[in-house]
Image (spheres, helix red, strand yellow):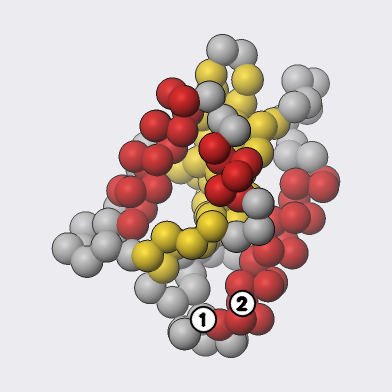
Amino acid sequence: MTEKRRLLFWEGSSKKDFKAFPTPVQKDMGVALFVVQLGGMPGSVKPWKGLGSGVYELVEDHRGDTFRAVYTVRIGDAVHVLHAFQKKSKSSISTPQPDVELVEKRLKAVLARHGPSGRT
């Protein structure tokens, strides 16, 4: 872990959506995001498939519901939370397409702001 803390940026409505999570989920994911800011990998993190390396999701289960926060560390020296959502589907393991598309859209927007190198 590095001693310098990365900046944390919330993209789109991700912070508002995150604040709608149950308090225990916010606390657990908040600690996990802090670990990421310090350069670590929290235990609840999984790679986000389909967008290459450097995009991850935090997954928390709470009272039968699943909550996710998708973030990237590949842009500059910062953590960008791209999307925070409650997974509604009980019958499917896969992430709903609208959520996948929103993550892709926000990642493209962040990359466009920071240029192809990802540096500010």
Residue 60 percent location from the top left of the image: 51, 29
Residue 71 percent location from the top left of the image: 53, 55
The front one of 77 and 24 is 24
Mark 1: few, some, or many residues within 10 Å (few <14, many ≥20)?
some
Q: Left or right: where does residue 60 sit relative to residue 65? A: left
The span from disc 1 to disc 2 (Cα, nearest Å) is 6 Å
Mark 2: few, some, or many residues within 10 Å (few <14, many ≥20)?
some
Residue 45 percent location from the top left of the image: 46, 42
**Dot label at residue 111:** 2
Q: What residue type is labelled 1?
A: Gly
Q: Left or right: where does residue 46 sit relative to residue 96? A: left
- Residue under numbered circle 1: 118
| Residue 2 appearing in the image | yes
**Residue at screen point 59% across, 86% down:** 116
85 lies above or below 89: below
**Residue at screen point 49% across, 73% down:** 75
SS for tag 2?
A: helix
| Among the 4 quarters of the image, the one containing residue 30 | top left
Asked whether the residues under the numbered discs 1 and 2 touch, taking CB atoms below 8 Å apart as contact, a structural biologist would say yes
The front one of 43 and 66 is 66
Q: What residue type is labelled 2?
A: Leu
**Residue at screen point 61% across, 14% down:** 64
